[in-house]
Image (tube, helix red, strand yellow):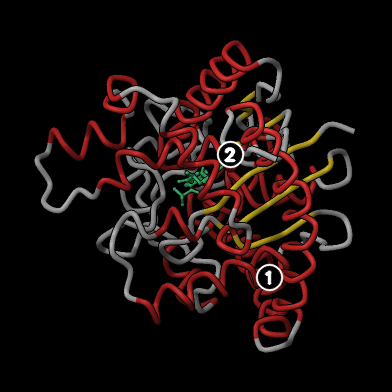
Amino acid sequence: MKRMLSGIKPTGQMHLGNYIGALRNFVNYQDDYQLFVFIANLHCVTVYQQPAQLRKNLKDAIALYLACGLDPDKCTIFLQSDVFAHAQLGWLLTCQSYMGELSRMTQFKEKSQKKEDGITAGIFTYPCLMAADILLYDADIVPVGQDQKQHVELARNLAERFNNRYSDTFIVPEPVSPKVGSRIMSLSDPSKKMSKSDETNKGCIYLLDDLNVARKKITSAVTDMVGKVNYDKINQPGISNLLEILSALTNESIDSIVNRYQDKGYGQLKGEVADAVCQCLATIQDKYHQIVDSDIIESTLKKGAEVANKIAYKKLKKVQKKMGIDIF
Ligand code: AMP
Ligand code: TRP
């Protein structure tokens, strides 16, 4: 069975884009791959996080993952900081990386071009930590959004560089992105990605939104003046986004939905999307409430850390031996 690994960085609340583009797919992958999912809490702090808020976001993220169907008996779920080998291999890989290649990483480049204040050294070196996250577990496949592909590319380069310099040690990982729903757009501005950095909050449906609030966001979604339901991302981006959401949540093909809407209007489509979203949120929220105050989170993380630590420690020792760091 191939090994798949992904990390999530919960610096904010999880939203419908995260669910359709990432979370939901992991649930399907857990039957076909040996799946490792970790909460990248060491990555969160490259930017200051208010401690109580961070703690809540981390806990919510785990509870939501479990609520969405990740099963700790089928996959390994853990907290990055519980496995010390991440930071240690991260350092060793920082020493294999060049300033030039890290300066070309989009996230750092954008922040430095905008001359943002307080860019930490962690923002600069974090792709090395991400490479360590992946390479420690011999992951064959890494599901990521488009924006993270560059970082997986760096992990590939570092794996090859290390293997050439010190002999075969790391599996060279492949990035994969989902075909459908990899880019759910904002409901209030369908030219932008649905994102937690949405200032108005009207375009982004959070998984823990009150159902009436979520419904309102959908019924107020920005559409167009065409007046006919077509899947046309260029001329009808708002309607196309609603079609994608509905298709993703119901598994009905977009073509089939468009067919059903030959003689129907936008209002009806919005109603159907709202029903599908609310049904999905209600199920998730119900499970979330059962999980968040139980001891399931703690026991899941404890079990996950034990499994992950064994694998990661072995790999780290191998690396240190090859580098000449360990003497016995
Ligand atoms: P982020 O919230 O940007 O840290 O992303 C976490 C995961 O959710 C990544 O795998 C993203 O690719 C995915 N994701 C985030 N926003 C969206 C979106 N609007 N549509 C689809 N997937 C998304
Ligand atoms: N950097 C990723 C993000 O911002 C999260 C992440 C950290 C990750 N380590 C990873 C994703 C390893 C995949 C594999 O979303």
Give how far across and how far down residue 203 sits, in percent: 37, 57
| Label 2: which secondary element | loop
In the drawing, does residue 234 fall left or right of residue 86? left
Q: Mark 1 vs ligand 1: CB under 8 Å?
A: no
In the drawing, does residue 235 fall left or right of residue 206? left
In the drawing, does residue 163 fall left or right of residue 306? left
* Viewer-side residue, 185 vs 140: 140
Q: Quadrant of residue 12?
A: bottom left
* Viewer-side residue, 301 vs 113: 301
Q: Mark 2 vs ligand 1: CB under 8 Å?
A: yes
| Residue for badge 2 | 181
* 85 w.r.t. 301: above or below: above
* 244 w.r.t. 233: above or below: below
Work out which residue is located at the far top of the displayed protein and give it.
164
Q: Residue at x 34, y 63 (%)?
A: 202
Q: Residue at x 53, y 35 (%)?
A: 131
Q: Name the amino acid type tagged 1.
A: Ile
Q: Quadrant of residue 62?
A: bottom right
Indicate which disc, 1 or 2, sits on the residue closer to the N terminus: 2
Q: Name the amino acid type tagged 2.
A: Gly
One can see residue 146 in this view: yes
In the drawing, does residue 28 fall left or right of residue 46? right
| Residue for badge 1 | 284
* Viewer-side residue, 128 vs 11: 128
Q: Residue at x 87, y 39 (%)?
A: 32
Give how far across and how far down residue 19 sits, in percent: 60, 54
Q: Spatial distance from mark 1 to mark 2, Cα to Cα?
A: 19 Å
